[in-house]
Amino acid sequence: MEVLFHFIFELIKISILACIYGSLIRLVAIIIGRHNPESWFSRVPNKKVSFWYLYTRIIFVFLFCFMFTHYGDHGLGDYARIPISHWREIEQINGNQAYIQAKAIDALDIDKFIITDDYVYGLMSSTNQNYEGNYFIYDLVNNKIRTFKQEKDYIKFLTTKINITSDYQDFNHHYTNYWHGLRFWILP
């Protein structure tokens, strides 16, 4: 039910965005038409509604399709998603269980982590059944997860691969950082 309500909200948001973008395109076409009276754009004021309606529908379809792409999908309902590099993602279900799924069947539950261009690393959740250890490193390039029981082994591996000066943050922090500002307001 949450998914349905969120999907309807997204359709309304896409409709509003398409109307705004269609109006902006029409306004730009009118301005160009006034500065260049012999161009195709000078005929736009004569076709006010049809021009706006056509571009609004095209933009609606584009935004709707973008909503289901890798970088446009943020999840529906109680499912949330952060797209990261190399066409990978970090997902969360029920608002509290964040996980990485390197293989089709094994999911690694994670608590706090850091995202870099080629790695995600941090602390594992205590609810893991398929992985042992307290620390993990997810190699995005090779799509492999490596776990560590001892912090010293984890730190030793990290210092050879990654700069470890950042603080670990939870999923909600990373989600808010990714889907904030203009990305929230101008995209579905």
Image: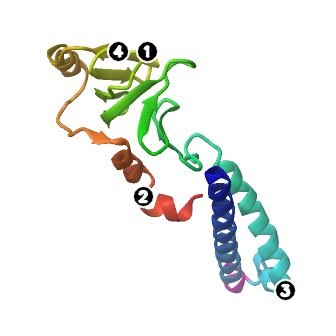
Local crowd at mark 4 within 10 Å, few (<14), some, or many (≥20)?
some
Q: Which residue is mark 2?
A: 180
Kindly identify the amino acid type of the residue bearing the numbered disc 4.
Arg
As measured in the structure, the alpha-carbon distance from the residue carrying label 3 to the one carrying label 2 is 39 Å
Q: Which mark is residue 107?
A: none
Upstream in the sequence, badge 3 or badge 2? Answer: 3
Q: Secondary structure at mark 2?
A: loop
Kindly identify the amino acid type of the residue bearing the numbered disc 2.
His
Residue 33 is covered by the magenta coloring: yes
Q: Which residue is mark 3?
A: 46
Q: Secondary structure at mark 1?
A: loop
Q: Secondary structure at mark 3?
A: helix
| Left or right of 72 in this view: 127 | left
Local crowd at mark 1 within 10 Å, few (<14), some, or many (≥20)?
few
Displayed quadrant of residue 105: top right
The percent position of residue 143, horizontal first and vertical second, equals 46, 19
Upstream in the sequence, badge 3 or badge 4? Answer: 3
The residue sitting at 61% across, 53% down in the picture is: 2
As measured in the structure, the alpha-carbon distance from the residue carrying label 3 to the one carrying label 4 is 64 Å
Start-end of magenta stretch:
32-36
Q: Which residue is mark 1?
A: 130
| Left or right of 170 in this view: 18 | right
The residue sitting at 80% across, 73% down in the picture is: 53
The percent position of residue 114, horizontal first and vertical second, equals 30, 35
The residue sitting at 75% across, 68% down in the picture is: 56
Q: Which residue is mark 4?
A: 146
